[in-house]
Amino acid sequence: MADLDFWNVDNEMIGSAYGRDNYKIIDLKKSKKCYIFFSSHGLYFPNKKEIFEKVIIRKDRYEWKNTALSKPIADIAGRIIFVRDICKQFYVRGINKELDSVDKVIEKLRMLTNGYEIVTVGSSGGGYMAALTAAALSAEMCFCFSGQISLEGCIDWNPLLKEKKTCETANRYYNISTLIKNSSCQFFYFYPAFHEGDREQFNYIADSINVCGFAYKQKNHAANMLAGNMRYIICRDKEYMLQLNTVYKDKIINPIEFLFRTTSLAAACNVLWKEAEAFFKRKIKRQ
């Protein structure tokens, strides 16, 4: 499979996808709560032309759909918005030809969420944009899973960040810790306790009064609670999450214990069953 210059919008395939909206809106009309889910660099992988064509062009994939449309969230959401960065560049080039900067994306989301209570969600690169958007729009909550707070360590290996580092409208978002600290939003930051890079990112905002950290007994980037557990956390209100943080503050969390504390017994067993099923499918596939 041929490699893909995924930051190059002059590439015919990338340019075609960049011409799409690259956001989707689903109106459920259950409340005045709007969830915004941001895709990460895991949107497609590896960075091959055939993979991009399959995942983005043909399947039109957005991350978080299964979680966002699951019953715990769908039952309480008024509007759900999915946003993706097909160039996987921390949204520095925006999401499409019209919304071609971080500021333009945020202003579009401001319009689409007018009158709603906003909750943003994202992991890694998507967590970065979820946190930035939450701060800019004064969201009620942000669920940030190992999101980058500073992009400064990414500049050397990221062609677009390097290109834009002298551009004031882009580089002012290369470190969003001050924006977060000055925001009225409540941030819940989830990260693996044994991943040095993720710990370092959390430390940029660890002393903020509007940030609650959850550190898990994990070592891989963005690994924290079990995937199936997320829907039972993202649906919670701020009071529940603040109380939950008092239980786990300054502790390293066992993901299974956390699962049973935050879901029903039946739901927890179902999550574990699906985790085991997925594990054995991956094992068989490797053989």
Image (cartoon, rainbow, N blue to C red):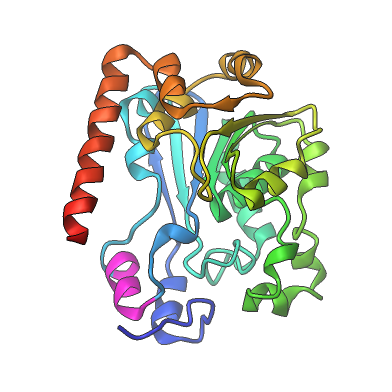
**Residue 196 in view here:** yes
Q: Quadrant of residue 265?
A: top left
Of 31 and 120, the residue lying toward us: 120
Check residue 51 for magenta coloring: yes
Q: Does 35 sit above or below residue 160? A: above
Q: Quadrant of the C terminus?
A: bottom left
Check residue 104 for magenta coloring: no
Q: Could you say where residue 46 lies in the image, as x and y percent from the top left?
A: 38, 70
Q: Which residues are magenta?
A: 48-57
Q: Could you say where residue 251 lies in the image, as x and y percent from the top left?
A: 63, 24
Q: Does 233 sit above or below residue 47? A: above
Identify the main secondary structure in magenta. helix
**Residue 19 in view here:** no
**Is 264 on the left or on the right of 79, as rendered?**
left
Residue at the image position 83 percent from the left and 45 percent from the top: 178
Q: Could you say where residue 124 lies in the image, as x and y percent from the top left?
A: 56, 51
Q: How many marks?
A: 0
Q: Quadrant of the N terminus?
A: bottom left
